[in-house]
Image (spheres, coloured by chain):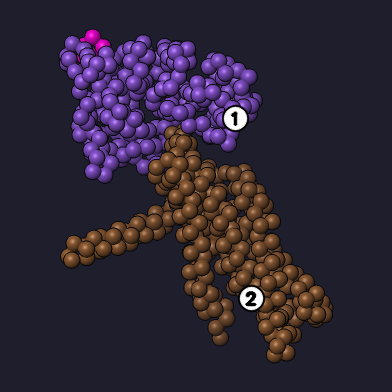
């Protein structure tokens, strides 16, 4: 009996140990990146390259996600509220949901899946093929050349894509509102403009900076700490996507509370 | 500044070097010197920790105890930032080349020049093309590593490592998996670098290559330097070493 208890407690402590090691590693990577960000040399060209592959190449995926999320929301709320004669509230409810939650969170989850996986697998492959060692041996810093450009590109690209996502989501909702629910287009957009305030926009927009940081940090951390060969690359990629997606969802709750206190609480 | 370094011709020194990975102790007490301009062959069975010795010389591994001296500096506790200067003096030739697969051959070679010199792009171009020519790789500058054969990748890796004209070169099995012709070419390049005065440590399982290039041989066994000297000296010292070198059953 005591052996079983010991084995279980050993397993639990190992799991927690790994969890703390992961958060500790990511935190150290963040501090190191922050320190290196302000020292020379800097690589703006690498940031631009990453902005293209992370931002521009993700835009179609994120905009389709935002657009169809808006369409589905409008349809669901429209069909539900129609029974109670509340169809006219669709523009208000949907636009607020999109701007405050749906666009930032859905875009970030898709971003974590596409960009997080890409960053983790690319860096892990570089570790396995000793390219990261080569960067260090050639007297340069993998933090400066690999981590910081990706982190900055995520911090720039995700908020911008989220803003675009807001527009596309609302347009998608508008199309459904007009074609499926029979709402007047002018009425729809007037209600959207009346409803969505700067605080609503900022609540969603500011979250994405945190999400971008969590996604890029997690992906870079798992990529750099890969162990084993190709199997390790696969494991690092999976972990990066899982952990960054969970971070987005968990932190969303706390960030919502934080921004409520900071921006809205009377 | 350490007294020994200023007064002797020693380029690399290990003293009481210990290193373990988890429960596995790789090095218990490694001590040896490499003189300036000398090429030391580092032999030992698989897993003896030969590459760990090389990696410690560029700070890719930190010793658990002991000292690692490069020229006149004890680098065993150096930070990543302090190691940058050391890494400009010490070149590391990886077993598989470790070329940047997203860059062309030209950009792989130009990498260190762009990072560490004030050369103009025209001067960099000339230096890269001259180096490629010297290594028999002229005309391949636009290719990517995936388009190169194994032998060519190793030669590009070697060319990239020495383009900053380092004073110490570390070779991590540069001839592994190569045919005799390419092995000969790599050895010739190593001899050419040696004739220019570069100090070298050559980790290999290729005995003929080691004996053709190295001045002395060190054999790692049980986490220590088991024997060190010329081939004749170490074979005479210990029958185990003679058997190991000749590939006989130990």
Rendered location of residue A213, percent (x, y): 52, 59
Q: Which mark is residue A97?
A: 2
Q: Is residue B245 left or right of residue B156?
A: left
* Residue B147: quadrant of the picture: top right
Q: Color used for chain B?
A: purple
Along the viewing direction, whichever of A184 and B168 lies nearer the viewer: A184
Q: Is residue A264 left or right of residue B235?
A: right
Residue B8 visible somewhere in the drawing: no
* Depicted B121 relative to depicted A173: above or below: above
- Identify which residue is drawn at 35% across, 18% down: B206
Q: Are marks 1 and 2 on the same chain?
A: no
Q: Which residue is mark 1?
A: B144
Along the viewing direction, whichever of B114 and B118 lies nearer the viewer: B114
Q: Are marks 1 and 2 in contact (CB under 8 Å)?
A: no
Figure chain in brown: A
The answer to if A254 sits in the magenta stretch is no
* Depicted A32 relative to depicted B225: above or below: below
Give, as a single range, the part of the protein colored magenta: B227-234
Rendered location of residue B215, percent (x, y): 31, 13
Residue A212 visible somewhere in the drawing: yes
The secondary element bearing badge 1 is classed as loop
């Amino acid at each position: 009996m005591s052996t079983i208890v010991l084995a279980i407690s050993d397993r639990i402590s190992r799991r927690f140990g790994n969890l703390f090691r992961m958060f500790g590693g990511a935190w150290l990577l963040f501090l190191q990146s922050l320190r290196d960000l302000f020292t020379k040399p800097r690589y703006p060209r690498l940031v631009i390259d990453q902005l293209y592959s992370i931002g521009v190449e993700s835009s179609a995926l994120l905009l389709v996600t935002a657009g169809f999320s808006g369409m589905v929301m409008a349809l669901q709320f429209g069909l539900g509220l129609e029974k109670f004669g509340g169809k006219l509230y669709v523009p208000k409810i949907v636009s607020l949901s999109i701007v405050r939650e749906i666009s930032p969170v859905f875009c970030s989850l898709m971003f974590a899946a596409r960009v997080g996986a890409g960053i983790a697998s690319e860096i892990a492959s570089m570790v396995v093929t000793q390219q990261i060692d080569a960067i260090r041996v050639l007297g340069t810093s993998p933090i400066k050349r690999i981590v910081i450009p990706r982190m900055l590109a995520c911090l720039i690209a995700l908020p911008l894509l989220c803003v675009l996502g807001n527009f596309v989501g609302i347009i998608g909702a508008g199309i459904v509102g007009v074609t499926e629910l029979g709402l007047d287009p002018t009425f729809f957009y007037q209600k959207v403009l009346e409803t969505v305030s700067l605080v609503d926009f900022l609540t969603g927009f500011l979250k994405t900076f945190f999400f971008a940081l969590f996604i890029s940090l997690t992906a870079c951390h798992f990529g750099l700490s890969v162990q084993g060969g190709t199997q390790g690359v696969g494991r690092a990629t999976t972990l990066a996507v899982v952990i960054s997606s969970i971070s987005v969802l968990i932190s969303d709750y706390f960030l919502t509370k934080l921004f409520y206190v900071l921006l809205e609480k009377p | 500044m350490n007294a020994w370094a200023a007064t002797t011709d020693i380029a690399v020194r290990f003293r009481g070097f210990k290193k373990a990975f988890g429960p596995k102790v790789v090095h218990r007490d490694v001590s040896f010197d490499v003189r300036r301009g000398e090429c030391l062959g580092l032999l030992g069975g698989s897993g003896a920790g030969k590459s760990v010795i090389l990696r410690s010389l560029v700070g890719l591994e930190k010793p658990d105890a002991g000292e690692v001296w490069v020229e006149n500096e004890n680098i065993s506790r150096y930070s990543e930032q302090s190691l940058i200067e050391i890494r400009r003096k010490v070149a590391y030739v990886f077993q598989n080349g470790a070329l940047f697969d997203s860059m062309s051959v030209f950009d792989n070679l130009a990498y260190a020049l762009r990072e560490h010199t004030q050369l103009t792009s025209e001067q960099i171009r000339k230096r890269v093309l001259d180096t490629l020519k010297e290594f028999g790789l002229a005309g391949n500058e636009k290719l990517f590593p995936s388009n190169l054969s194994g032998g060519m990748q190793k030669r590009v890796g070697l060319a990239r490592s020495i383009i900053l004209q380092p004073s110490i070169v570390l070779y991590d099995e540069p001839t592994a998996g190569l045919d005799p012709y390419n092995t000969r070419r790599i050895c010739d390049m190593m001899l050419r670098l040696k004739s220019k005065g570069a100090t070298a440590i050559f980790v290999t399982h290729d005995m003929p290559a080691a004996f053709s290039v190295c001045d002395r041989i060190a054999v790692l066994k049980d986490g220590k330097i088991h024997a060190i000297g010329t081939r004749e000296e170490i074979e005479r010292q210990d029958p185990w070493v003679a058997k190991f070198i000749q590939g006989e059953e130990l």
